[in-house]
Image (cartoon, helix red, strand yellow):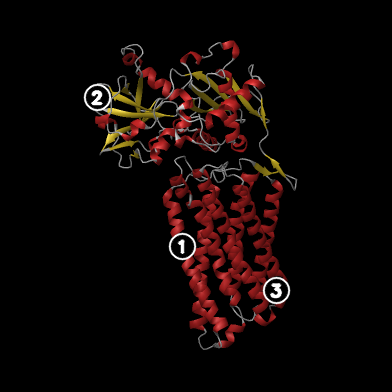
Amino acid sequence: MGAFDLVVGVLLLGLFFNTYLYGLVTYQFLVYKTTKFNDPQWIKSIVLVLFITDTAHSAVAVYHGWEMCVTNYANPASLAVVSWTIPFTAVATSVAAILTQYFLGHRVYKLTKNYAIVAVIGILSVLGFVFGCYAGVRSGIIAKVENFAPLTPFVICWLGFQTAADLLITGVLSFVLSRSRTGFRRTDTIINRLIRGAVQTGLFASLFALADLFSFVLHRDTYLYAMFAYPIGRIYTNTLLDTLNSRVDLKNMNTSIVDSDGPNQAYKMQNQSQTFAAGSNTMLSAVHVQKEVLTQLTRQSVHTFDRLYSKAVRTTSDNLYLLSGDSIKTITDQTRGTTAVSRTSMARTNPEDSVYQLLASTRYDPFLLSVTWNDDTDGPSPFFLLPYQYERLVSAAFAHEWQHVSSTLTFLALKDACRNAVSQQLTPESLQVSALRLRITVSEDGAIHVTATPLASKFDMDPTFLAGKPPTRLTDAQPVRLIIDQEPTEPSIFTRTKTTNRTVYIEAKKRNETIMNTFPEGVASDVLLYNTEKYITEATIFNVAFWRYSRWVTPTISSGCLPGVMRRKLLEENRVTEDESGILTKESIQAGEWVLLFNGVQGCRLGKVETL
């Protein structure tokens, strides 16, 4: 080993690695700036300050290499004294650490609502910053490497507190996110990606900080510690930018919006089952569901539903329809009630008291027990795509910044509310042969309200059947008659999420009421909507797809349409494709052409465009 390997050699290795990481920082920064995330100003400011700090520090690092290898090429005595670049490194690293930890601490708060944990993270981060700045400035004052022994306790405190904050953040985020798993593949895949990001955020910075610490304590007469010290700031910035930019991948993994890290949003995921209890060392359930049936629902009817539901799950599809038609009895007597409510302990008011609620429409149909792709976590389900309905409700709650819903709405509570509503509407004999439309509303305080109404008939074939056929091979005796709206509809949060605020859809039907009244009585009709840029978006109660280039093509989410559950299912199975080329304009629609219509109650239907 050469005389300068542990001085000049290791420093150059650190500078090379730091420069490589700065290249990644620059790339990540450009991706962040060009993606146009809808982030609050404080996050954008942190990103900008970190990039400026990294740029300055990387320039200083290159200067340090020049100063050592060129300016002092023939002056080995200069290695016994540190230049101003080493103190600058300590301060710049401390700045990067506290800004990144502040950002991640904010996410911990949004996920846990635990002030104690966030306070501990804040204290550790501030202490690390103070000791880091002090150690850096003090090293510049001491200057001579042989006199660095008094710095040891300050360096230990600096890197120790900094590492403790990183590991605490990593542990809390990983634990809380792991508790958020729902059992649904798509959601769990996103959560696993978030857990991986949380681990990466703290792990790499902690490893380099600890290596820097032990190198300084054991080999402070060399520049081994500088090899690890220089890249730490870049590691912090890279992990933070990766966390922000990874939302693009998460959005592609989920048809729901996974976008900005707004002032009231964290990872777009929140613990569905448990959370830290402030001021306590124990875990408390965040969801205390108290079922309060607001109708004459008896325990016997609930038990009857559960028993028959379980029996139906075990019954083959052939046996489900052996019951006589005489046994089908639809209860329409309003005195018996048609609704059941599952309320959380946080509920204060009736859902109708709010300005609007989140809305979902699904279907109870015993035929669905024979459709293998409609399973949920309990196996075959008579509720149409209920897991997708649940995930869309959670996404909508985040979009509307409804904090209570994200911590109280669980799939089990939603399913129980649907079961109760079905039990109120159907007799034990009709549970296996009748179909119901379920209207689900969720208020801002987390109350779930489900109303069940009878449907004319149950499914008799796979509800996605029509999506697999070209229009030339399809027939429908009574297609939905479609009219193109007379005016554009401005996209908004009320078109991208489903709520009881249906104003834009009601107005669209009113504008076309005269034409629709000319259709024969009993003929289904709807209005095709388009946005202000004249791109087709949806119908008032359906997502839509048009036959283009030998494929069914549906408008993209960016058009302003609702990300419907049936739309998501068809996209996942590649039965429809999104209009990435922008071909579905108002002018492209032809009178008489077939339109594939789909929603979470009726499945797939055919529509036909009326004469324009």
CA distance for labels 2 and 3: 82 Å
Say few, some or many: other residues with alpha carbon within 10 Å of mark 2 (under 14 / 14 to 19 / 20 or more). some
Tell me the element at label 3. Answer: helix
Sequence-earlier tag: 1 or 2: 1
Quarter containing the C terminus: top left
In this picture, residue 461 sits left or right of residue 209: left
Task: State the mark number for residue 24.
Answer: 1
State if disc 3 and disc 1 touch (CB < 8 Å): no
CA distance for labels 1 and 3: 32 Å
Say few, some or many: other residues with alpha carbon within 10 Å of mark 1 (under 14 / 14 to 19 / 20 or more). some
In the picture of the structure, the residue carrying the numbered disc 2 is 592
Tell me if residue 84 can be seen.
Answer: no
In the picture of the structure, the residue carrying the numbered disc 3 is 151
Residue at figure coordinates x 60%, y 13% from the top left: 336
Tell me the element at label 1. Answer: helix
Give the residue type at disc 1. Leu
Q: Position of residue 57 (x, y in %)?
A: 53, 67
Q: Is residue 13 above or below residue 103?
A: below
Q: Name the one closer to the observer, 59 or 256.
A: 256
